[in-house]
Image (spheres, rainbow, N blue to C red):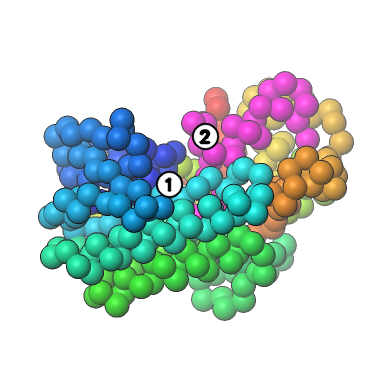
Amino acid sequence: MKILITGATGLIGTELVKVLLAKGHTINYLTTSVSKIESKPNYHGFYWNPQQSKIDENCIFGVDVIVHLAGANIAKRWTNAYKQEIIESRTLASELLYNLVKKKPNQVKQFVSASGTAIYPESFDKVYDETTTETEDSFLSNVVKKWEESADRFQVLGLKVCKLRTGIVLSNLGGALPEMVKPIKMGFGAAMGNGEQIQSWIHIYDLVTMFSFAIENQLKGVYNAVSPNPTNNQDLTTVIAKTLKKQLFLPNIPEFVMKLLLGEMSYLLFSSKNLSSQKIIDEGFQFQFLNIKEAIEDLYS
């Protein structure tokens, strides 16, 4: 297939491109940086700027599937201006793609969008799956709602829409994990709060193979992109320390301390999401990394 990807040069996109190219697919990708535009066998870059509603319309020629990964990093202090950027980087991009598919003759059959688990309510005991209608009233939850609404519009154009609600992505190349590892390596590691908050995670390999699986099986609807076995913050911190052969000497860090340091963004460290991935398993997807210990050891042993 020919697949158009936004965010192809980011953490997830880079690994997804490798997987799809290895399977013989052709990749078109959109970038806001002219210097990142390449044209190699089965890999072609095109310029776009969602803020200015600019896009190279040639990007959609012959495309079967659009994968929308682009979005401003949420792990950055949430000023009012940056909150707006987080929302617009997702919704304006979707809008631009929607208008392109609507007006330009094409053969696109499926729109696969990244999404987030922040939409779910806080939970320690109750396990939430994709059928839940309860949502959390928070900034990030509202971001996810708008993100998914912008993806759902493609159904009007006759496309299958698939949304992968992604948990904490474990990679040694970027994202949250290296930030957790740094203080532990230096001997200053500690769990957050009481350490009991549930963290629904996924290894980067499983995430990109799930995107590939969704594309090749033309899935539609919402799927939780999380491991079948969530962990809690205390256990995650302990597993990282043991893998790195480091001791945890410090007491757990109180929530108010991180709120002073990070502001509203500290929500990311103390949020508890207990989620099921049974729906994607029932579709036939097989996870490579089922527990937190083997995932961390794969990345840092």
Residue 253 in view, yes or no: yes
Give the image location of residue 141, x and y in percent.
60, 64
Are dots 2 and 1 in contact, CB under 8 Å? no
Give the image location of residue 31, x and y in percent.
33, 42
Circle 1 packing at 10 Å, graded few (<14), some (14-19), many (20+), is: many
Residue that appears at 59% across and 50% down: 82
Three-letter amino acid code at the position of disc 1:
Asp
Distance (Cα) linking label 2 and label 1: 16 Å
Asked whether 168 falls inside the magenta stretch, the response is yes
Sooner in the amino-acid sequence: mark 2 or mark 1: 2
Asked whether 1 falls inside the magenta stretch, the response is no
Three-letter amino acid code at the position of disc 2:
Gly
Pointer 2 residue: 174
**Which residues lie in the magenta part?**
166-190
Pointer 1 residue: 206
On-image quarter of the C terminus: top right
Residue that appears at 55% across and 27% down: 300
- The quarter holding residue 42 reads top left
